[in-house]
Amino acid sequence: MKRIFLIGYMGAGKTTAGRELARVLNLEFVDLDHFIQARYQKTVNELFQEVGESEFRNIERKILQEVGDFENVVISTGGGTPCFFDNMEFMNDAGRTVYLKASPEALSARLNSCKEKRPLIKDKNEEELYTFVVESLGKREPFYSKAHTIFETEELVNREDVTRYVEQLINKL
């Protein structure tokens, strides 16, 4: 039985690397945000707006614990998931946690190209986005650093990078 939780900031590559990791290891892949969206028939952003952050985090925790019982799975979590309740401890106890780590510069560059899909950052210019990433990453780092494995994804840019990174990650698991 395998259970791998991928954590890290938005834009770190959790979903992209998670899909490939699951494929290579012949495991099921679950994106926690997509699972929540399917269950509630609303986007994470809609839920966030309708019920507020506190209730969204309760929903997220409940769904995390549900999918945390799945076997032979790679689970990509939301960027904030490890930072609330006892979620990080739950994931560490339930399986193997991997922090996909990238610098604020790399994360800002990735997020700048897709920010229209992310309400928290869609209206930020490059400088504001970088400042936002630095500040929020600083708050989340203490939680992320509790992962069993910290894996640098600084140069995760294209398909070849994903394949190479996943091969390297498998060697660390």
Image (cartoon, rainbow, N blue to C red):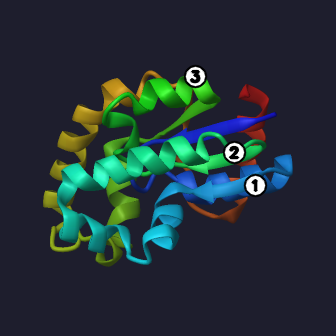
Q: Are marks 1 and 3 in contact (CB under 8 Å)?
A: no
Depth-wise, is mark 1 or mark 2 nearer the camera?
2
Q: CA distance from mark 2 to mark 3?
A: 14 Å
- Residue picked out by circle 2: 70
Viewer can see residue 127? yes
- The x and y percentages for residue 106 are 40, 51
Q: Residue at x 38, y 41 (%)?
A: 103
Q: For this rendering, which residue is in front, 1 or 153?
A: 1
Q: Decide: few, some or many residues near mark 1? Use Cα within 10 Å; few <14, some 14-19, many ≥20.
A: some
- Residue picked out by circle 3: 93
Q: Earlier in the sequence, mark 2 or mark 3?
A: 2
Q: Is residue 163 above or below residue 139?
A: below
Q: Are marks 1 and 2 in contact (CB under 8 Å)?
A: yes
Viewer can see residue 163? no
Amino acid identity at mark 3: Asp
Q: Residue at x 19, y 69 (%)?
A: 49
Q: Earlier in the sequence, mark 1 or mark 3?
A: 1
Amino acid identity at mark 1: Glu
- Residue picked out by circle 1: 28
Q: Earlier in the sequence, mark 1 or mark 2?
A: 1
- The x and y percentages for residue 114 are 38, 73
| Quadrant of the rendered image containing residue 23 | bottom right
Q: CA distance from mark 1 to mark 3?
A: 19 Å
Q: For this rendering, which residue is in front, 149 or 26?
A: 26
Q: Is residue 47 above or below residue 145?
A: below
- The x and y percentages for residue 162 are 67, 55
Q: Is residue 73 above or below residue 98?
A: below
Q: Is residue 37 above or below residue 9?
A: below
Left or right? Give the position of 8 relative to 112. Answer: right
